[in-house]
Amino acid sequence: MAVTGIVRFERLFRIAAELDVDKQDIKRVAEFIARKLHDLLLRAEASASANGRDIIEPYDVPIPKGLQEDIHAFRRIDEDVEIQPILDQLALRPPLDRALSVETDARLPELAGGLVFALARLFKILDPQLKNPQSEHWDKAEQIFDLLL
C-alpha cells in the first residue's frame, strides 16, 4: 500500500476511535476486510440461492443495525479522509457460485469502510484507554466479529 494510503488509514482510526495504528496494523485491517466481506457474501449467496436467484442483490447481504450505522458514520467522515479509493482496491470480490449485481459490487467499498469503522470502535469498547492495538486486541476483536458476523 502506498504511503498516502497508510496515512489515510491512520487518520480514519484516529477519527473513528482516537487510535494510533502502524503499517503492520494496516496489513491486518486489509486481511480482516477480506475475511469479513467473504463471510458476508457467503451468507448473501445463500440468501440469493434460497430465493431462486443467480445474482446476489444488496438486500441479500446481511447487515446488522450496528454495522449499518457504522457504514453511515464512515460515509460522513470519508469526505475528509478520502479512503474510498483505497477500499475499492481492498474490497476484493471473492470467488462465489453466484454473481454480484452491479449495485452489490458498488456497495462493497462502503461496506468495507463500515467494517473498518466498527473495528476501530470495538477496540475502544474492549479497552477505553487503548491508544495502539496490540495482538491481543486484534485477536479478541476478530473473535467477536467471527461470533457476530
Image (tube, rainbow, N blue to C red):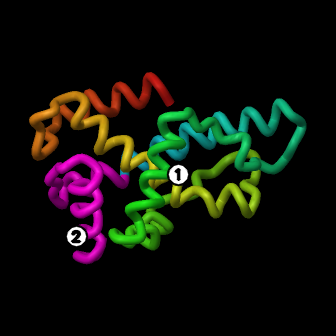
Is the residue 61 above or below the residue 144 in the image? below
Return the x and y of residue 5 as percentages of the image width and height: 30, 71
Q: Are marks 2 and 1 in contact (CB under 8 Å)?
A: no
Is 26 inside the magenta-drawn segment? yes
Side of 22 relative to 67 (left or right):
left
Structural crowding at the residue carrying mark 2, measured as other residues with C-alpha within 10 Å and reported as few (<14), some (14–19) or many (≥20): some
| Tag 2 residue | 7
Residue at the far right in the pictured view: 52
Return the x and y of residue 11 as percentages of the image width and height: 24, 63
Is the residue 24 above or below the residue 97 in the image? below
Return the x and y of residue 37 as percentages of the image width and height: 52, 46
Return the x and y of residue 82 as percentages of the image width and height: 38, 72
Specify the amino acid type for callout 2. Val
Is 96 inside the magenta-drawn segment? no
Helix, strand, or loop for circle 2? helix
| Tag 1 residue | 111
Q: Give the mark nearest the N terminus, 2 or 1.
A: 2
Residue 77 numbered mark, or none: none
